[in-house]
Every structure is written in C-alpha cells, then in structure tokens.
Image (cartoon, helix red, strand yellow):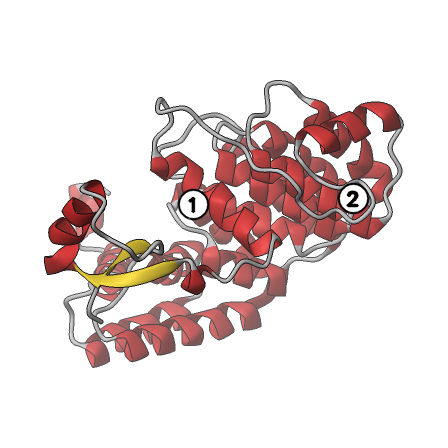
C-alpha cells in the first residue's frame, strides 16, 4: 500500500481489517473486545478475514470455558459459510502448527473430490520426513483414518515409513480403521515382515488388527515366524513371552511398549506397584539396595494432585 492509498477508502478498510485481525488474535485482549472483532471478521467475509478467524484456533485463552466457546462459535460460523472458506482454510492449514479445529471445519465444508484434494495437498506439505513436533501429522493421520475411502487410504501409506514411531503407529491404526483390505493388506504385511521396523508394539498391533479384520496374507509362513518371534500364540494371539533388553536401552524408550504389553496381557499394575511419597523415595531405594525391603512390589513415586 503506497502513501497515496493510505488516505483512500480502500486504504482505511484495509487498515481496519488488520486491526480486527490483530484484536481477534490477541489472547490478552478483553473477551468482549476480541469477540466483537471476530463478529466483524465474520461480517467482512473476505479470504483475509476468514484467515483472521481461523488464526483464533492457534492459541489457548487463559479462561478455558470462554476459549472453547469462542472456538465453537468460529467453527459453526465457518461451517455455515460452506465451500467459500476452502481457499483460506487450505492456506491456514499450511501455515499452522496445529490442525485440530481446522480439520473439523474441513469435514463440514468439503466432500468428495474437494476433501480428497485438500488431504492430498496436506500430505505433500506434511510428508514422512523428520519434524521436531509430529503433532500436526498425528492429527492429520487420525482424521484420515476416520474417512473410509480408497484414495484416502492410499494417502496414508506414506506414514508407514515416517521417521517418528508414534506417527507410524497411528498410521497403522488409521489404515486398519479404514477397512480397505485391497489397499492396506499388502503394505501392513510388508511392514510386519520388515527387518528395519524395530517397534514391537507396531508389529503386535498389525497382527491384532489384521486378525480382527480377517485380512489375508500372501506369505503366511513368514508372517507366522514373525508372530512366533514376537512371542504371540498364533492360535489365541495371546502374548506368551517377554523380551529382555540390555543396559544400553533406557527406561523411557521402552515405556510405551511395556504399557501396551501390560494392557494386552490384562495385567493389573496396581497389584505390582506401590505408591511412595516423593520425600521417602531415597530411603526406600536405599533399603532395597541393602536387601532390607521385604515388600516386593515396585515403588512408584506418588505425586499429590
């Protein structure tokens, strides 16, 4: 905008729009002032104003009830606008670090080819390479798993090779939920047999899911060997073996798998552990090291809520 434009009607409108966008995105603004800005953006209805509305999804207001109310209001207003929102929504989702509310809006305004094309572009923008925070990809994968469509199932396949184990696990669950055997059976079998896939819980989930869905496998003998290596009874799918790790592997990487195994085996962890106040931890551990602790249950730090 040049100096000459600054004093025109269009220039004033552009400045007012930017002020509304800033106020609507200001978590420190008074709630009535911010909500009035949101209403004005809704009434403006331009693509820039719609992006201003969408940006309200990107932060959490200190007052959680009002925060949820504002976001619900925006969600319903954008859904009512229909496909007009799509260009702004696609731009926002490319730039945003989170997709939760935006995907809810997408579900309401995009169907068929519009939905598939938007998801295709999102998958290109959020591929299976490394990112510091995989939360955005996890949200996308979960959303796609809820939409049973062969084309969407095909888009999910790239996440079976994601760098992040959590994303790969979510992709397996999403593909199993898709219920598209002609699309998912072979890729899941390939991942199950892969020597580079080190996640035990992913392979166990594949075995469980394929068995529940009745998916057929082409290399049955190889699959049965993997099932045996996992310590799973091929007939009952119950876990019948444990895996011992060396001291080179710390507790944190193993915790998700241990929790998954305990759930699978229906173990009541409360019977194997005992709560210990944090101020007593050192004394309890010293007693165990000296062989003076007769309680065989594992001490777990008890935090006050």
Rendering quarter of residue 231: top right
Q: Give the labeled residue for mark 2.
A: 210
Q: In this rendering, would 40 be left or right of 187?
A: left
Closer to viewer: mark 1 or mark 2: 2
Q: The C terminus appears in which quarter of the rendering? A: bottom left
Circle 2: element type: helix
Q: Residue drawn 64% across and 18% down? A: 195
Up/down of 234 relative to 265, above or below: above
The spot of residue 54 in percent (x, y) is 40, 59
The spot of residue 48 in percent (x, y) is 38, 54
Q: Give the labeled residue for mark 1.
A: 135
Q: Residue drawn 41% across and 24% down? A: 246
Circle 1: element type: helix
**Dot 1: few (<14), some (14–19), or many (≥20) neighbours within 10 Å?**
some
Q: In this rendering, would 244 be left or right of 213?
A: left
Q: Residue drawn 35% across and 56% down? A: 297
Q: The N terminus appears in which quarter of the rendering? A: top left
Q: How many numbered discs?
A: 2
Does residue 117 appear in this view?
A: no
Up/down of 194 relative to 81, above or below: above
- What number is the disc on residue 66? none
Residue 19 or 98: which is nearer the viewer?
98
The spot of residue 168 in percent (x, y) is 57, 36
Rendering quarter of residue 181: top right
Q: Earlier in the sequence, mark 1 or mark 2?
A: 1
Up/down of 204 relative to 14, above or below: above
């Amino acid at each position: 905008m040049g100096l000459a434009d600054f004093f025109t009607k269009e220039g004033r409108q552009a400045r007012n729009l930017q002020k509304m966008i800033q106020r609507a995105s200001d978590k420190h603004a008074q709630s009535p002032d911010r909500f009035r800005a949101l209403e004005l953006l809704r009434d403006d209805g331009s693509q820039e104003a719609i992006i201003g509305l969408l940006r309200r999804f990107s932060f959490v207001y200190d007052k959680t009830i009002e925060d949820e109310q504002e976001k619900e209001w925006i969600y319903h207003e954008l859904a009512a606008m229909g496909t007009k929102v799509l260009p702004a929504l696609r731009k926002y989702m490319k730039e945003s670090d989170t997709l939760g509310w935006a995907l809810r809006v997408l579900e309401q305004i995009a169907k068929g080819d519009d939905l598939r094309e938007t998801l295709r572009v999102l998958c290109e923008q959020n591929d299976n390479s490394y990112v510091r925070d995989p939360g955005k990809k996890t949200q996308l994968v979960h959303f796609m798993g809820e939409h049973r469509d062969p084309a969407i199932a095909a888009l999910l396949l790239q996440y079976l090779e994601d760098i992040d184990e959590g994303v790969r696990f979510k992709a397996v669950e999403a593909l199993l939920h898709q219920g598209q055997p002609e699309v998912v059976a072979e890729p899941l079998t390939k991942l199950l047999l892969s020597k580079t896939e080190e996640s035990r819980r992913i392979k166990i989930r594949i075995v469980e899911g394929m068995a529940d869905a009745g998916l057929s496998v082409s290399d049955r003998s190889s699959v049965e060997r993997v099932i045996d290596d996992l310590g799973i009874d091929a007939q009952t799918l119950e876990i019948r073996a444990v895996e011992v790790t060396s001291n080179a592997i710390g507790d944190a990487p193993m915790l998700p798998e241990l929790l998954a195994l305990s759930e699978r085996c229906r173990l009541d962890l409360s019977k194997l552990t005992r709560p210990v106040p944090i101020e007593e931890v050192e004394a309890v551990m010293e007693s165990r090291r000296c062989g003076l602790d007769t309680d065989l249950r594992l001490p777990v730090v008890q935090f006050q809520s």
